[in-house]
Image: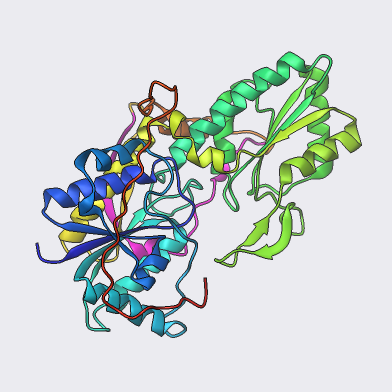
Amino acid sequence: MQGNLLYAQSGGVTAVINATACAVIETARKHKVRVLAARNGIIGALREDLIDTSRETVAAIAALRHTPGGAFGSCRFKLKSLEESRAQYERLIEVFRAHDIRWFLYNGGNDSADTSLKISRIGKALGHEVTVVGVPKTVDNDLAVTDCCPGFGSVAKYTAVSTLEASLDVASMAESSTKVFVMEVMGRHAGWIAAAAGLAGHGADEPPHVILFPEIVFDEAKFLARVKATVERVGWCTVVVSEGVRNADGRFLSEVGTRDAFGHAQLGGVAPMLAQLVKDRLGYKYHWAMPDYLQRSARHVASKTDVEHAYAVGKAGVQYALAGRNAVMPAIVRTSDAPYRWKIEPVPLSKVANHEKKLPKRFISRDGYGITDAARRYLEPLVRGEDAPPYGKDGLPRYVRLKNTSVAKKLPAYAIADK
């Protein structure tokens, strides 16, 4: 086929986004298509900062499947409308034309789906047609249409395992030390990751004893009463809280007053805030943790199902692009819970961009502090299976670092004013 394919990673990376990159490059190579990668996402595309993946060995590309992080760099940068930022769109098309880019795969979450949709609509208008495919990725699991998002299964597994292991520690020390453990997980508007912690236990006395979801308004008195009752009954209490928990006024409990590149409110630490509240009101000794980047980069405990999902969407993304399917996203479709079965189907980006999938009410227990059997049926298949990376003699994982050889620039330098 004539032309090059451009691949870029966007937003917060995951433990398995490079498995998608692996699939994109391996699939394109089978079709004799050269893959360029944008360094640091759409910013690299605008700057004409491109990487020639054909300079990488077969073994190096294969090793991406078990390597966390973003092999080509990512970014948080949202293109505005064509009317507001026409110069940026014209620059993108100029770069695409200069490097004969006929297919563009943007690997990211909701904002990336929006960017992909916008680019898919302007190529023809600006004189260079390009087929655009949005490839799903987000630990938040909040993309519409797709059953789940690559990256979520592994962070869900990490969260459930960490909740279980930390709780065993707390239980051991509760008699004379820590009574309450609070762990904060990602999830600004949707409580999927917090819900995954519920897989750690089954009964009312098994951890996590309290899960705080963004979908449920935080009630301080009710929360403290629940913690107190749990400690008195069990001897200790594990709390898992989503970073996006809000009060009755609709404000994030941990909002610090600043905003990120996408205009999202920057959140502080809700875990230490709740832990101190427990100490001040109930007098219990506490510990808290914020896994933060650890939860999304923990490739050593990745879900095998998640790795397979990540590879499958990358492979399908290339196939859709080469077939001329513009403005679509490969979605994961669940066909059976038990046994777990799934397939990949194309969905229009217009049904994904600017839509957000929150945790269904039927997944949250009636008291608002746990998950239901329906949630377990959904979550459990996504965390199944182990796909450990290879380890070296030093006891550490063997992750790959690509050469990332730059492509020679053909255009004048371009400064990005709005980063």
Residue at point 44%, 34% (across, down) = 299
In this image, 68 relative to 181: left or right?
left
Segment tinted magenta in the rendering: 340-366
In this image, 244 relative to 247: left or right?
left
In this image, 183 relative to 179: left or right?
left
Percent across and percent down for residue 150 are 39, 44
Please tell me in which quadrant of the rendered image residue 199 appears: top right
Residue at point 42%, 34% (across, down) = 382
Which of the image's four quarters has the N terminus? Answer: bottom left
Percent across and percent down for residue 80 are 47, 76
Task: Choose between 154 and 365: the one closer to the eye.
Answer: 154
Residue at point 34%, 79% (across, down) = 91
Position of residue 31 relative to residue 183, above or below, is: below
Task: Choose between 56 and 366: the one closer to the eye.
Answer: 56
Q: In this rendering, does residue 362 appear at all?
A: no
Asked whether residue 236 is drawn in magenta, I would say no
Q: In this rendering, does residue 284 appear at all?
A: yes
Position of residue 137 relative to residue 125, above or below, is: above
Position of residue 307 relative to residue 8, above or below, is: above
Percent across and percent down for residue 210 are 70, 32
Asked whether residue 353 is drawn in magenta, I would say yes
Task: Choose between 52 and 338: the one closer to the eye.
Answer: 52
Q: Count the marks: how many?
A: 0
Position of residue 199 relative to residue 310, above or below, is: above
Percent across and percent down for residue 279 are 87, 34
